[in-house]
Structure formats: structure tokens, C-alpha cells
Amino acid sequence: MLSLLQIKNFALVDRLTLEFGQGLNVLTGETGAGKSIILDAIDVVLGGKVNNRLIRQGTQHASLEATFDGNERVLQWLQEQEIDPLDDGTVVCLRELSLTGETVRSRSRINGVLVNLQLMGQFRNLLVEITAQGQTVQLMDATRQRELLDLYGGTAILKQRKLVESAYENCKKAEKTLEKRKKSEQERLQRLDLLEYQLKELDEAQLSDPNELEQLEQERDRLSHVVELQKLSYETYQLLYQNDNGEPAIADRLGEAEMLLTDMTEYDKEIEPLLEMVQSALTQVVEAGKEINGYGDRLEADPQRLTEVEERINLIKRICRKYGPDLADAISLYEKLRAELEELNDSEQSIEKLEKEYNLAYENLVKTCQDLTLLRQKAATKLEKQLVKELKPLAMDKVIFVCQITPCPPSMNGSDKVVFYFSPNPGEKIQPLSRTASGGEMSRFLLALKACFAKSEKSSSTLIFDEIDAGVSGKVAQAIAEKLHNLSETYQVLCVTHQPLVAAMAENHFRVEKQIIEELSQLQNEENGQLSLPELRTVVRVKALENIQNRREELAQLTGGHSSEDAMEFATSLLVKAESYRLGKPSI
């Protein structure tokens, strides 16, 4: 419920504070008094479009603030958006406008938290439903029309929608799993191809010893220097064991030393350890000489083996560049690739099984959507009859209304597109409501629709009607007044009206009028600087009619344009009759 509206520098309003109450609130006044400005302010504060004409002339800033009493749906939405409610449970919507040149900028806040217009638009749907002439409203939207039909259908449709939502989620989950599996299958096959190629290359390399490269390089060096090694080994042999040049070899010299030390031990036993050392050295030199001689004899050139070794070295180095950096790393990677290949081959899931699961989920979704369609069709037939019945007393007794349901792809909302078709006058082809109804017709249509929903839609939203009674009088105006009152028992209703019958039914009555006031304006003077001079300005004023006499006078003005005795008596009778209707008493 809208409890408080504060306006500053908006259109013809300089400053204005309005406190609305429960039930039916009406705004009355002369044509052009500015009643629609109040409705425009509510629209703009909740995210409506703005232009530079909405900021009061002579100012660059405007602000609009609306305070609503919260309810369960509102508080839940605030919690979802992580916006803290106020201590008293109210919600404050603020929009600030600023003018720079011809450009209007705005900022919106909910309970002090900055929000974008899209978010404010979502919140607006929980708070108010505005039906104003020349203005696009929620009811024009096919999505909203489907929601209204579902709401009208009651518990059965709402339960079925839950089943549809669950079936849709399951179907999307199965579809996502299938698509992921197909994608992973593609990736798996690509990975298998790569692994098989890499393993084939590594298998052909026959890698096992991480030291193989070092050993091969040693063998290559030996094979590449056979002649030099043979020469050096022979020279070493000559030096150690047998010298062909006639000079004693090292073994000969050590033999001589052994003989001398042996003679010395006959006189001094302490020489024996030295003797043993020389004898050991002699033995090792002789053995080394024989070994080097054998080594030299075994050496022989092998060009074919040298070629094989060099090719093997090149292969291993290429493998290391691709899979290394060293041979041990390449061998380790080979083992990992083999394990991964085995895992990929063993973890294959059946795409056919997942496709079957998806098809079953889709079939279930289609079935639940079909059941929902049947329920909607029944509700649509009932709504068509009741709505036409509600419209007849509102000067629309020849109206044709069709709630058309056409198929669309299954979604979480079912497989139906719901569009309200409407023909207000005989002989006119029915067309979508959004292209047919005028502002006044739309207001009465929504009034009748809300009358159909009075028992099924339990929300605390505020319904706003702009001149719903335009062009009607007598019984029709009385019927409108009674329907507005009946709606006000479920909703808060704000209504701009010129009908005394409607105004008399209100619990809260406001008179809107224009006044001319003197306002100081700032002028620049070359000699005296800035001057403040009086200027006549037109402003909108709103007065709450809180006593019976003020209401009589306003109703008399609406009736006859003046407060004559007859008009005052008629106004009194309207108030008495309205009070009797509200209390359930017979009309007088």
C-alpha cells in the first residue's frame, strides 16, 4: 500500500506531501488542475520514463519519494536482492532527477540502496498497477496476461505450473548432461588420437634406461676415436710393462726397487711395510699393463655401429625435445600417457543412454505442459464469461472478449502463449487488447478484470485508475463506483475522477487545484549584483478533504459547478448513499 508520496520540483509541483490511506482514494478537481501529475509522479518514482519537461522550470533538480507498507512478497523480493527492510517494515523508493542542458539524468534508490531502472521495474510490479490513458501498462504484456489467467485458474493451475517447472528443470538438466557428454566425447576422441600418436612414437623409441643417452654418447666417442685409442693404449703398455726402445719400463724399475728393499730388510725389519707397498705397486702396474694391452687388441673400427649409435642419439634427443626435457622425464611421461589412455578407454559412457533419458524427460515435460494447457483452457472459458458479465454494467454491454491460447515451445511456464483479444463495439473485429482498447476502455477493462480476481488474487498491491469514468454517467457511474469500492476491500485503490458518484464512495478524498503564487527569482544586475525579484508562478496544490462539509462542497462543485443549495443537497444524498452501500445497508 502506498502510504506517503513526497514530490519536489516536479512539473507544476514545487513541494507536496500526500498521505494516502487504505481503501478507495480519489483525486478530484477541475480539468487541467494537475490531477494526472500526481499519477505521473508515482509512475516516475517507480522507474517510468522521464523528459526535461518533468523538471519544474527554473530548477535543475527534482526528487520523488514514495513510501509503501511492505508485505510478504515485497519483503521476500528485498531479501533476494540483498536490500535490508526498514525497521517499521516500510519500503522507501526514491528517484532523483537532474537537468544538464536538455539531458535528464536520474538515480533510483530502494531503502537507500542504488538500483537500476530494470530492477526498479521488477519491484514496481509488486507495488502498483497503473492504468492511465496514453500509457503502456502491464496488462498489455502477453506474459502478464498468462500470469493473470493462471492466477484466475487458482490452485489447480498453480500446482500444475509447479509440476511443469520441475519437469522443465529436469529436462534442461538432462539436455545439459547430454550436451556435455557429447562435447566431452568429442574432446575424448581428440585426446585419444593425440595419446595414440604420442604413445606410438614413444613405443617405437623403446625407451627404458634413463642413462641410455649418456652411454650411447660414450660409445660414440669411443667408436669415433678407435685409431687414436689404439695408439695411446700401446704407448701406455710400453711405458708400464714392456718398452721396445730399450729403456726400462715402470715395471722394470719397480722390480729393481723391490730387490733393493728386500736386501735392506735383512738388516732392518722396519723396511718391510715399504717393501709390501712397492710389491703391491708392481703387481698393479703389471696387471694394468696387461689390461691396457688387451684393451688395445680388442679395439677395432665399426662404421656401421657408429652410424646406428648416432641415429639412436638423434632419436632420443628429438624425443627429449618433445617429451622431456631429459630422457627420464620422457620415460615418466610415457607411463602417464599409457595410464591416461587406459582410463579414457574404460570411462566411456553411453551417449545412447543419455539421449534416452533426455527424450523421456522431454516427453514428461510435454505431457505436463499439455495438462496445464487443458486447465488454462477451462479457466479461459470461465474468465471470458465472467469478464463480459462484469463489463456490461460499465457501458460495455456489447463487448467481445476472447482469451486466446496458442501453442509455443515448452518452457518453465508451459507451452502456451496467452493473448487477450478484445472488441469494445459491435461490428469491430477482435484484436489483441494492446492494439484495441483506448485509455478509458482499458481502465474499465482492468476494473472488471480485477473484480474477477478479487477472491483469487490476494496481494497488497495498489491499483491506480486515471479517469476510469470518463464519458459515463448515471447507472454506469454508480456501477463503477461500487466496483471500485469492492476492489478497495482487497486492494488500495487510487482513482482520478470527475464523477461525484465515484468520489462520494471514497474513504479518502483529495482536491487538486492550481494556484498562482509569488516566488522570488534571482536576476543579475551589473550595478547592484544579484537581485531577488517577485515572480508569479503556477503551482499544483492538493488538499485532503477530511471533514464532511469540505466533501459536500467538492461534490457540489463536481455536480453543478457551484455550491448551490440544490447541489449541496444532492452532494449530501450521494454521501449518505455511499455510506449505506459501504455498510451494507439498503440505498436511500
Image (cartoon, rainbow, N blue to C red):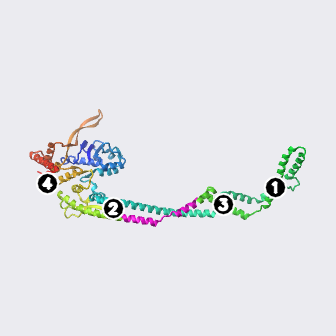
Earlier sequence position, callout 2 versus callout 1: 1
Image location of residue 71, percent across then percent down: 29, 48
Q: Are marks 3 and 1 in contact (CB under 8 Å)?
A: no
The local secondary structure at tag 3 comes to helix
Residue 420 vertical position relative to residue 521 in the rendered view, above or below: below
The amino acid type found where label 4 is placed reads Gly
Q: Are marks 4 and 3 in contact (CB under 8 Å)?
A: no
Q: Can you name the residue that lies furthest to the top here?
A: 528
The residue beneath circle 2 is 414
The residue beneath circle 4 is 474
The local secondary structure at tag 4 comes to helix
State the mark number for residue 287.
1
Residue at 35% across, 61% down: 411
Q: Nearer the viewer, mark 4 or mark 2?
A: 2
Q: Nearer the viewer, mark 2 or mark 1?
A: 1
Residue 586 covered by magenta stretch: no
Q: Nearer the viewer, mark 4 or mark 1?
A: 1
Region in magenta = 336-365
